[in-house]
Image (spheres, grey):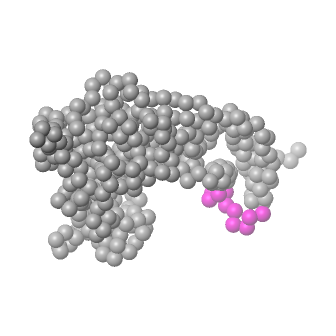
Amino acid sequence: MKRPDSATISIIVCIFIILVLSFSLVFVLNERGNTEALDFSSLQELAQTIRSQYYFYDDKELDGTKLTDGAKRGMISELDDPYAQYFTEEEYSQLLSNNSGDYVGVGISVQTPDETGSLVISVYEGGPAAMAGIQKGDLITKVNGTATANLTLSEMIGCFSDDSSVPDEITYLRDGVETTVSVLRSEVHINRIVSDVLEGNTGYIRITEFNGSVASDFAAAATALQEQGIDHLIIDLRDNPGGGLTEVLNVAYALIPKGETIVSIRSKSGSERVYKSEGDEQFDMKMAVLVNGNSASASELLTGALKDYGLATIVGTQTYGKGIVQSFFHIGQNEGWAKMTTDAYYTPNGVCIQGVGITPDIVVDLPEELQDTSVELLDPAQDTQLQAAIRVFAQQAEAPQAANR
């Protein structure tokens, strides 16, 4: 009997992987109430055709795994769900690493370059860039000799070295003086909390997103502010895109009384999960929350709960309006992960903000010339939203006196 050649074996392996994918997806769909049979025979035929007929086919560049990954990405793209995505095992592991707040890099966050360069909007404390002297507000003009002006953000990122043992030469502009430093990538921890003490015994905490150690970092920052004698707290959620449900709930525990509903999550089937505060102690301070059109998802969840209970005055502009929840599903055995929208969430008052957002108690925008400026780079004196939040506390302090006149 003739022994199968390597091409035939590869086709068989590819077909087997597609069959495993087919059965896995059918099982997930059936579990969610869809019993319609799906025919994947055409995928098998397409895989065989690509292997046998595609002129540029190369096993090293486009193997069976890449073909099946492409098929899975194609299925996800048909969901008409802007938040749906397929991840390979490697991509999913990288996602978890990024969300944890620990990664290997130079330790900066930058804006898309303009005609001059790319503005540094944050520098992570203790990271390589900070150690090299780069500061928030510097303008990066070159990376490894390539001018950054007018590049896309992805093109700029591509200027950095792929080899973590090779330092990057970064040229930045500060006060009209250009400086070039050598920065070697290393482990960086992203602290998603920024805190400060403002005028009138007012504390300020900015939460950039709800991932990693955000809950413990928030608690530490709020405790430190209390120890400094503050009795008012501004929580800045502007430009906060959201994050993990567990992380935002853990922050909410410190702000919402124990036993009170924080959020209700309802699935396609109509089942409901109600999440209540489990915090034994809350920070007892008058609060204001800053939001804008980029405050989304988990940041809206927290904002909605604080607003419904009257625990904070909401200041800023209408939020983004993402009131839906995505879930991850492991496909087969080490065959990747699928993320898709599975639920909608409701505030304690039973409101779903999907496509609507949250209207602040006090609507105020930034001056037009500052509306494209990163929150981290705003001058507090010119930040009209921040100043409006500060005035809230002053007005609250004056109210009892006015009532006695």
Q: Quadrant of the C terminus?
A: top left
Q: Magenta span covers which residues?
A: 53-62
Residue furthest front in the image: 405
Q: x, y (%) of residue 5? A: 78, 51
The reply to whether residue 185 is visible in this rendering is no
Is residue 166 shown to the viewer in this render? yes
Q: Quadrant of residue 398?
A: top left
Q: Nearer the viewer, residue 396 or 208?
A: 396
- The residue under the point 35% across, 49% down is 360
66 relative to 112 in the view: left or right: right
Q: Residue at x 30, y 31 (%)?
A: 254
Name the chief secondary structure element in magenta. loop
Residue at the image point whose x is 24% and y is 32% from the top:
283
Q: Position of residue 292 (x, y in %)?
A: 36, 54
**Residue 125 percent across, percent down from the top left:** 23, 49
| Above or below 201: residue 381 | below
Residue closest to the eye, 365 or 126 = 365
Residue 127 placement (x, y as % from top left) = 26, 51
Instruction: Left or right? Give the position of 91 relative to 76.
Output: left
Which residue is farthest bottom?
115
Residue at 32%, 37% (x, y): give it.
310
In which quadrant will I find the N terminus?
top right
On the image, which quarter does residue 210 sit in?
top left
Q: How many marks?
A: 0
Is residue 241 depicted above or below 120 in this figure?
above
Which residue in the rendered view is the most extreme toward the right? 1
Q: Is residue 259 left or right of residue 233?
A: right
Residue 331 falls inside the magenta stretch: no
The answer to if 55 sits in the magenta stretch is: yes
Please tell me which residue lies in front, 31 or 161: 31
